[in-house]
Amino acid sequence: MTSSPSAVDVDAVLALLDAATATDGVRPVSEDAELRLRHGSPGGHDLVVHDDGALAGYARYDDGAAELVVHPDHRRRGLGRALLRQLLDLAGDRPLNLWAHGDLPGSAALLRPHGFTRARVLLQMRLPDLAAADLDQRPALPDGVQVLPFSPGRDEEAWVRVNSRAFAWHPEQGRMTRQDLERRETEPWFDPDGFLMAWRGEPGDDGVLLGSHWTKVHPSGDVADEPVGEIYVLGIDPDAQGMALGRALTDLGLVHLRERGLRQVLLYVEEDNTAAVRLYESRGFRRFAVDVAWHRAPAREVVAPSSGG
Ligand SMILES: CC(C)(COP(=O)(O)OP(=O)(O)OC[C@H]1O[C@@H](n2cnc3c(N)ncnc32)[C@H](O)[C@@H]1OP(=O)(O)O)[C@@H](O)C(=O)NCCC(=O)NCCS
């Protein structure tokens, strides 16, 4: 076994991610981590481990957060533990958060002995029958508010500002920058018509953005055999909350996805975000899967068992 923190073979890592997805039924890294890997974003650490000359494991560490996967053909040989040790070294005295997508049994078994505890649960909810959903096609909007598609080059600043206010409490979403947004604008799935912006007044003039609903469409084969829609980011400025704008934007986005012929929709939401979970349940969404963030306090306070691998 060899491991290396140097430049990684991105195509080989993507093939490993595909193999794990096919076996586990869930993608082992977040969309954001995968985008950073593909675009060679600076700042994070990509770790790989080889077994019999083949790429057998991959981990990404970025500012105290990490993800880790071992190829299904190379599991239970100590590679996961070896990558975990490298992640713990990178974290040093700082806390480490590790995402376990799908909450698979191996993740808990690997992490618990190293002092990790379940810290956050991210729900994936699904709406299995969009055609049958009871949606308001023309929801009432607050006075003077209009909903328009996202306009690239004009709306970025306003969106980043409202997103950071709406998700100020959220460790990842609230930190999205203009560059993170522009990286997504170059993705093949990006569609300004499915990115709905609620403005009071005229955008670009003295209009004020109150909230937005950004939808996404996963192509066939990505999460299901058929294309699947997503409520990708729904955010309402704190000053505009309580006006039923969230419900109106949810329905308008879902109507857009229905008009595109989609039959299923998914979304991710923090399990303890009861307001959002209730809104989505009222539209017919149900729990489908969970991702768990495991947290480990600074290394000095925890004694990890010694082991081979
Ligand atoms: C979780 C994962 C990374 C483990 O990788 P691995 O290389 O198989 O793990 P190791 O061989 O280093 O296992 C170390 C210990 O973890 C435990 N363990 C790992 N997988 C396990 C499983 N499926 N069931 C029970 N215990 C398991 C065992 O105690 C094991 O020690 P042992 O083999 O001596 O009994 C791998 O299953 C994987 O990639 N899963 C999908 C992605 C994922 O869930 N990532 C989150 C990781 S935190």
Image (tube, rainbow, N blue to C red):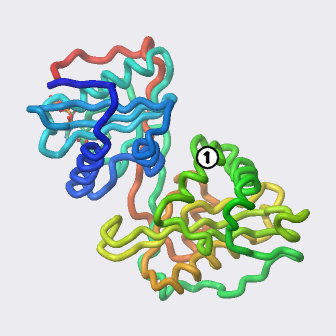
Residue 255's x, y, as percent?
58, 82
In the rendered structure, which amino acid carries the disc numbered 1? Gln
The residue depicted at 74 percent of the width and 75 percent of the height is 147
**Front residue (pair 136, 158):** 158
Residue 12 shown left or right of residue 65 in the figure: left
- Residue 108, how many percent across, how many down? 31, 38
Residue at the spot x=21%, y=52% of the render? Answer: 19
Q: Quadrant of residue 242?
A: bottom right
Q: Is residue 297 left or right of residue 166?
A: left
Image quadrant in which you'd find residue 152: bottom right
Instruction: Please state which of residues 216 and 172 is positioned toward the viewer in this rendering.
Output: 216
Farthest left residue in view: 52
Compared with 141, 216 (above or below) is: above
Q: How many marks?
A: 1
Q: Which residue has dot 1 on it? A: 179
Residue at 47% from the left image edge and 72% from the top image edge: 229
> Which image quadrant is residue 148 in?
bottom right
Q: Nearer the viewer, residue 140 or 62?
A: 62
**Left or right, residue 206 beside residue 288:** right
Farthest right residue in view: 206
Q: Residue at x 44, y 39 (%)?
A: 40
For disc 1, the neighbor class at 10 Å (few under 14, some 14 to 19, many from 20) is few
Report ligand 1 position as a quadrant: top left
